[in-house]
Structure formats: structure tokens, C-alpha cells
Amino acid sequence: KNEVEQSPQNLTAQEGEFITINCSYSVGISALHWLQQHPGGGIVSLFMLSSGKKKHGRLIATINIQEKHSSLHITASHPRDSAVYICAVPSMDSNYQLIWGAGTKLIIKP
Amino acid sequence: DTGVSQDPRHKITKRGQNVTFRCDPISEHNRLYWYRQTLGQGPEFLTYFQNEAQLEKSRLLSDRFSAERPKGSFSTLEIQRTEQGDSAMYLCASSLAVEGYTFGSGTRLTVV
């Protein structure tokens, strides 16, 4: 069974700060997902990555396959970035299921 | 095509009633997933379709739950004899392969 751990669980920062959210997993994977969920809202897929780094706007995701670790960075954070950020990896028991981290609740204060 | 659509957005029902939710995936996506999310928890996998075939079903899905995807396009999730413990956000997602999930906005069910 693949275990996914995220840190921190909660993060509060001031607008403009550089944000880092970490994700570690226990078993080798083919790809890792980063997703965003606003309060009461649906889930938005941010990144799917299997190696290296991806960038989309102010969001950057990196993954180190050897260390089984991924990070999500937000540059020039803004209050609208406030959300829960979740990493997820494929289940070892299934080709179709994702195993989800507990999420990181991010609050950006103006 | 504007993404994955779910209907209704909110549903309040009395305990014991049946409810049905609909999901319209992105048209070219052959894979469709249903997840359930309760407050403060991550999503739990319920079931998976590849085209019209239901290939996987979680043990979480009791006999009161049934899902269909009759023509390999839209899907329905029905809950019979609803219980208060069924109150949750029901999320649908679709993908073309194992990567690239696109989620709908979810249907929030409240059983009173």
C-alpha cells in the first residue's frame, strides 16, 4: 500500500510570500498529482508529473523520484490562492485509484 | 466542452429516500471515476468506468449504491434508502488515460 504524507497540515502566510508544500510517498510511482480544492468546492487538477519540474503561472511542482518526494511552490502568493492543496499517487492495488494525502490548508492573508 | 459537469450541485433529501446524481465527463475521455468526500477528509474512491464497463468498485460501495454509464458517455450514481452517513460531497472525474484527471464541481448531498 502506498502511503502519502503531506506537510505542513496548515499554513498561514502573508500575501506575496513564497509558499512550499511537501509530499512524500512510500512506494515508487509512475506519476504524482497535485490538486487544489477551495472551501465547499470541487477539485481542480493542477499538475501531473513523473519527473523533474513543471510550471504553470505562479505554481511550480517538482518531483524527486529517487527520494520519493514532491514539492508544490507558489510564488508571489495571493489571497485567492487560499485553498486546500492535495497530492495524490496511484494505488498499488489498482490501476485506477488514487491514494490521497491529507491535504495542506493554505491561508494567504492580505 | 467546458469540463466535467455534475448535476445537481446540491441535494437535500429525507432519510430513506432514493437519490440519483449525474456526471457528464469531457467528451473524449473514456475513463470516469466517482469519489466521495466527507468534511475534512480526502476523497474516497467509489467506482471506475472505462467506456461503459464498470471495471472497479470499492468495498465502500454498499448494495444501496449503484452506478451506470450506459453508453460510455454520462454516468449516474444512485443511492437507495439514503442514510445520514451518506451525507457527503460526491465527486466525478474523467480522464483519457491514467493521467490527467479532470474533476467536476461535485454534488453535495445532505440527508436529513
Image: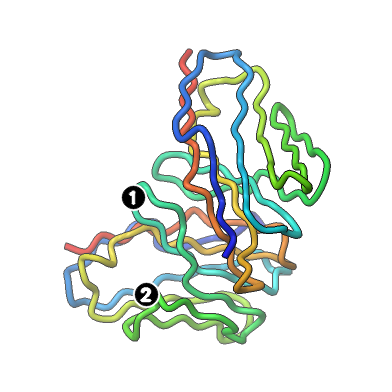
- Looking at the image, is mark 2 or mark 1 earlier in the sequence? 2
Residue at 45% in and 53% down: B42
Q: Position of residue B92 (x, y in %)?
A: 52, 64
Contact (CB < 8 A) between labels 2 and 1?
no
Mark sitting on residue B20: 2
Indicate the secondary structure of the residue bearing disc 1: loop
Q: Nearer the viewer, residue B36 or B78?
A: B36
Query: Which chain letter matches label 1?
Result: B
Tag in front: 2 or 1:
1
Q: Position of residue A44 (x, y in %)?
A: 58, 47
The x and y percentages for residue B6 are 48, 62
Host chain of mark 2: B
Q: Amino acid at mark 1?
A: Leu
Quadrant housing residue B16: bottom left
Q: Which mark is residue A34?
A: none
Quarter of the figure with residue B18: bottom left
C-alpha separation, residue under disc 2 versus residue under disc 1? 21 Å
Tell which of A7 and A109 is nearer to you. Answer: A7
Label 1 crowd bin: few (<14), some (14–19), many (20+), radius 10 Å: few
The quadrant the N terminus of chain A occupies is bottom right
Q: Is residue A109 above or below residue B102?
A: above
Query: Both on one chain, marks 2 and 1?
Result: yes
- Could you tell whether B73 is left or right of B58 in the image? right
